[in-house]
Every structure is written in structure tokens, then in C-alpha cells.
Amino acid sequence: MKFSRDERKARENKRKHGISFTLAQNALESGRAFYAGDQFEDDEWRMVMLAPVRGVLILFIVITLRDGVEDDDTNKEEIPHYWNADNSIIRIISARKADKDDQIRYLEHGI
């Protein structure tokens, strides 16, 4: 997996939520992340992931996948066909501690 981040946004996220993007990346790389849905915000598709870290904390992580190619002829409101983490760069948008409902959803998923 390849990752990218906006360092200013990473600092802001750490200040606001107490979660570093490095910790979020570790959680995503754990192999135990759970895809929890899509969002369309700020003119791009985003994925919501729930992932454990350090065995006790479940994170709510928002990412977008970039393939490095802009295609202006596509409808940006359609989920991108290239959403494949194996071939894309994962850009972390935000990360926070999962709320109680998301923690339950993760635990019920049984990863």
C-alpha cells in the first residue's frame, strides 16, 4: 500500500482528534480494516474505514484513493472505477476514535 497525506491537515487532525495520520496508516495496514461506506464531499469520493490499532482502539478513518490520473470526462458523482487499493495511492483525509455505534458495527462485523 502507498499512502499520501497533507501535512497541514495531519497536524490539524492530531490537534483536533488526538489521532496522528501515522497511527491511522498503521491501523489500515493491519489487515483488519473494515470498509464502512462511501461519502461524496468536496467534489471527491471518500471511503470510510473502521480499523483497530494497538488491539484496543478502533479508528474511524476517511480516505480517498488516487490513481494519479484526472479524467474530466467522468461524472465525479459516480464511484470511481479505479478504487482498488492495490493500484492506488491511499490519501488519508481524517482519523478519529470511532464512536460507540461504529465500534459496535466493527465488532459485529467480526474481523
Image (spheres, rainbow, N blue to C red):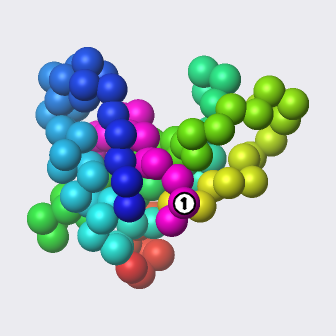
Tell me the quadrant of the picture where the N terminus can be found.
bottom left
**How far across and down, in percent of the image, does residue 15 sit?**
16, 23
Above or below residue 2? Residue 13 is above
Membership of 19 in magenta stretch: no
**At 19% from the left edge and 46% from the top edge, which residue is drawn?**
22
Tell me the quadrant of the picture where the C terminus can be found.
bottom left
Count the labels in the image. 1
Membership of 99 in magenta stretch: yes
**At 33% from the left edge and 34% from the top edge, which residue is drawn?**
5
Above or below residue 51? Residue 66 is above
**At 27% from the left edge and 52% from the top edge, which residue is drawn?**
25
The residue sitting at the front extreme is 69
State whether residue 102 appears in this view. no
Locate residue 108 relative to residue 15 in the image: left or right.
Answer: right
Task: Count residues near mark 1 (Cα–Cα under 10 Å), then give few for <14, some for 14-19, many for 20+.
Answer: few
Locate residue 73 relative to residue 77 in the image: left or right.
Answer: right
Residue 68 picture quarter: top right
**How far across and down, in percent of the image, does residue 85 sit?**
51, 60
**How far across and down, in percent of the image, does residue 19 sit?**
19, 39
Q: Give the labeled residue for mark 1.
A: 87
Q: Which residues are magenta?
A: 86-101
Say which of 2 and 96 sits in front: 2
**How far across and down, in percent of the image, does residue 110 sit?**
41, 81
**At 80% from the left edge and 41% from the top edge, which residue is drawn?**
78
Name the amino acid, label 1: Asn
The residue sitting at the bottom extreme is 110
**SS category of the residue bearing label 1:** loop
Say which of 69 and 16 sits in front: 69
State whether residue 21 appears in this view. yes
